[in-house]
Image (spheres, rainbow, N blue to C red):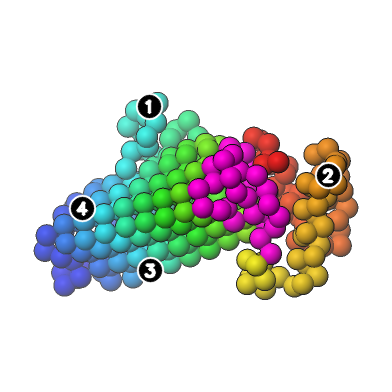
Amino acid sequence: MVAAKIHATAIIDAGAEIDSSVEIGAYSVIGPNVKIGAGTRVAGHVMINGPTTIGQNNHIFQYSSLGEAPQDKKYKDEPTLLEIGDNNTIREFCTFNRGTVQDKGITKIGNDNWVMAYVHIAHDCQVGNHTILANNSSLAGHVDIDDHAILGGFTLIHQFCKVGSHVITAVGSVVFKDIPPYVTAAGYDAKPHGINAEGLKRRGFSAESILQIKRAYKTLYRNGLTLDEAKAELVIMQETTPEIALFTDFLKLSTRGIVR
């Protein structure tokens, strides 16, 4: 560790593994079994407990609590994990908890995520890459968030729910069921409101692909089909539009049912 990058008031456990390029601000506390990769910046008044692994070039803002024990009454001090990838921004007052042995044993956040203030990620959640979790979003335990999903401020996700790739939720949405890829969802409880067309344009989807995704959405939600009938139609559609495979693959894994 380079002393100039570690504030004199920070407390670093001897069992922590901190790359020499890491910056740690005033009054932060880094516990044992914590690993922090190159280029990561930890602001002041941050608490990181282990076992926790944090990758490279992350920016963790003040007053966040990472790697604390899960908020689960079944937890009995088992050595579960929190894993954070690379290039994530984690703003003020975020709380990420470790996993539980009853599930995956790990809470995992991928790469290039933008996590705004007061976001809570509970035990055993799996967050992909390039997501945006706006202020005060909360994930209950065992939630999966796929790549490029955007959660509007104060979105609440019920435990065991899955949120597909390229989904966007409105402010204050409360989600009790799975949200398929590409869908815009809003309300309490959340309902589908078309596809996230603007987000797809920004990510380089062609006009034709977006048109076909709209057709798939209508097949799933607007054509009066049962869910099984819609699934069969989507399998046919994906033969000419590969992007539809995100729908079909997601529906195979859905266990809570989808927003309707």
- At x 28%, y 47%, the residue is 49
The residue pinned by badge 3 equals 57
What is the C-alpha distance between the residues marked 3 and 2? Answer: 43 Å
Amino acid type at circle 3 is Asn
The residue pinned by badge 4 equals 29
Label 2 Cα neighbours within 10 Å, binned few <14 / some 14-19 / many ≥20: some
Q: Which mark is residue 73?
A: 1
What is the C-alpha distance between the residues marked 3 and 1? Answer: 34 Å
What is the C-alpha distance between the residues marked 2 and 1? Answer: 40 Å
Above or below: residue 154 compared with residue 88: above
The reply to whether the C-beta atoms of the residues labelled 2 and 1 are less than 8 Å apart is no
Left or right: residue 136 versus residue 201 is left
Amino acid type at circle 2 is Ala
Above or below: residue 77 compared with residue 165: above
What is the C-alpha distance between the residues marked 2 and 4? Answer: 52 Å
The residue pinned by badge 2 equals 230
